[in-house]
Amino acid sequence: MPRMLQPGNRGPGKNPEVATPPVPVARAIVDCGVYVDGIRQPTPPDIRSALAFVRTTGSGFVWLGLHAPDERQMNDVAETFGLHPLMVEDAVHAHQRPKLETYDDTLFLVLRTVKYIDHDDDEVANDIVETGEIMVLAGRDFVITVRHGEHTHLAGVRARLEQTPEHLRLGPATVVHAIADRVVDSYLKVVREMEADVDGLEERVFAASSRDLDIDVVYLFKREVLELRRAVQPLAVPLSLLSGSTGTLESAALTPHGTEIQRHFRDVADHLTTANDLVVEYDERLTALLNAAATKVSTQMNTDMRKISAWAAIAAVPTAAAGIYGMNFDFMPELHYRYSYPLLLLTLFAVCFTLWRIFHRSHWL
């Protein structure tokens, strides 16, 4: 009996398939630091050594930063830190809704990031908000940040916290707060940059004639505002849980200084409310602009129809006369009168001019 070829094997004389080697988790690591009493310790050789150091000494925490890890890389991290499989699945697959979940003693926070893209032409209104995601997995002695997108860098957040050891000394919750604060501040920056675009669209809609009006631009910009709204609005509930008295931070054993951290989260929640109010305002203004633009187009169509109807009424007079006198009857009045033709032209002109005056005074022409 001939030997069956296993998947990936080839017969004699054929090149075997080369299996894709697994990509080590180190490829996805942006930075990994161990912090004791708010001070960064010497860089560990790998994440297992970092976590072992923290748990052996019983002090400090590990902050691991990842960028777009694949499933295999994230499974290695999950095995090291003891993460729930559902957290791993959500961390690998982007396009998650902002949310806050707790798995045993681990907190899982999803944040949508946004970036405003500068542009000079309103025609690119469908591509002015770039989105990304940051997932934060935090436990008693570790913080893991998973980033998706090219504008979600957290190096500045890490550097700023390392300059203030008194904040890092409060534990992993400080890192969660700093990341949330950075994301919400970016919301405020984006909505304030978009204000000029909304104002410009208002001027364009009300200043342009109906013939030059392009409703598509308003609609595309409204779609970008809705994308921003989907990032900002759902984050209110997670921040409410983190800043409230529900014990979310304590249940995840993130910090013994819950009250102080909650005050900082309340400040972030206030900033989020401001950003959300502005986004809702822009959405309502753009809705009003769409209605106004549609009304202007409808009004212009009515005006055009009235003009067409008025000119059709004027043209009907000579058309009727031509139809009557164009019939080939032998006995018709005024056919043989010397001045019939000029009198008919004069009569037609007088009637048409009278109709034109009437329509003009009625603003139909």
Image: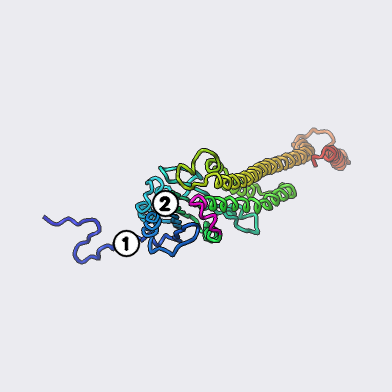
Residue drawn 80% across the image and 42% down it: 365
- Residue 216 vs 42, above or below: the answer is above
Q: Position of residue 137 (x, y in %)?
A: 45, 50
Q: Secondary structure at mark 2?
A: helix
Residue 172 at x, y percent in the picture: 48, 51
Three-letter amino acid code at disc 2? Val
Is the residue 354 above or below the residue 150 in the image? Answer: above
Question: Does 197 lie within the magenta span?
Answer: no
Give the vertical position of 122 relative to 343 (above or below). below
Label 2, on which residue?
92
User: Does residue 40 appear left or right of residue 215 in this picture?
Assistant: left
In the rendered image, is residue 153 in sight? no
Whether residue 348 sits left or right of residue 77 in the image: it is right
**Mark 2 Cα within 10 Å, few/some/many (few <14, many 20+)?**
many
Per the rendered image, the range of residues in magenta is 164-174
Q: Residue furthest left?
A: 1
Q: Residue at x 45, y 45 (%)?
A: 253
**Mark 1, secondary structure of its residue:** loop
Secondary structure predominantly adopted by residues drawn in magenta:
helix
